[in-house]
Image: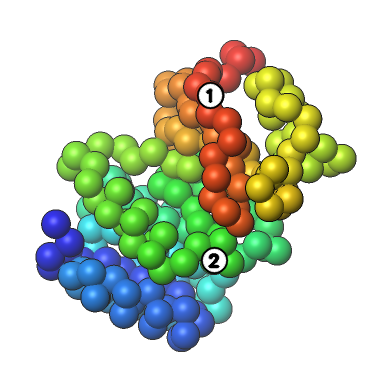
Amino acid sequence: MAEGRPILIVEDEDLIRDTYARRLEHEGFVVSQAPTGRDALRVARLSPPQLILLDVMLPDLSGLEVLKSLRADRRFLTTPVVLFTNLSQHMDKHMAARLGATDYLVKSEVAPADVVARVRQLLAAAPGQRPIASFQLEVNPEQGDAAALASLLGYPRDYTCARCGQRLLLQLDGDFSDPWSRSFRVRLRCPACRETHEETKGEPTPA
């Protein structure tokens, strides 16, 4: 049930923030908004939300700094925090996971309906349960580790969607913030038509 569940949106772009806020409010959530990192910490501490949507690039503190401050507060140890990033923006995903990010979404690749669905999924987890993180990597056979990982997992070398020709994404789902969790799920997905081409499960090779 979304009825009355508090969500905090931290985003400095008014149009994006208002768009998500209106959609979440339409779905029955109670939405607070913050345009800066310092505002986010103030609002969260005054009225702790059950989930936080947090932009990485903010005009004062970065989203990662805000995340670090939140996780240092016992009230927010298990609060799902979803990071928003731009497609062209570099983000240290390993650092985000170590700081306790639950998930991250690329703004240009998700619609408000996708955000609502992810919020519902995370809030459906049992209280105190560590949410599963999901990371998407572009599979470019000419550069990057994603292609090497896809090849290692046995995926075919043609990393384009047979339906629309879009470059596929390698999506990894797992608890990457828990050093004791060694299982993960991998899907090869098309970001355009959202078709899942392959799916496998596995464990990382011990170092």
Please report contact status of discs 2 and 1: CB closer than 8 Å, yes or no: no
- Residue 149 shows up from this direction: no
Identify residue for label 1: 200
On the rendered structure, is 118 left or right of 182? left
Q: Nearer the viewer, mark 2 or mark 1?
A: 1
Q: Helix, strand, or loop for circle 2?
A: helix
Q: Foreground: 40 or 2?
A: 2
Q: Quadrant of the C terminus?
A: top right
- Residue 183 visible? The answer is yes
The scheme the figure's colours follow is: rainbow
Would you place residue 93 above or below residue 50 in this image? above
Instruction: Kindly state the secondary structure of the residue where label 1 is placed.
Output: strand
Q: Residue at x 55, y 78 (%)?
A: 59
Residue appearing at x 18%, y 42% in the figure:
127
Q: How many marks?
A: 2
Report the front residue among 38 and 4: 4
Q: CA distance from mark 2 to mark 1?
A: 26 Å
121 vs 23: above or below:
above
| Residue 206 as seen in the image, left or right of residue 148 | left
Residue 84 badge: none
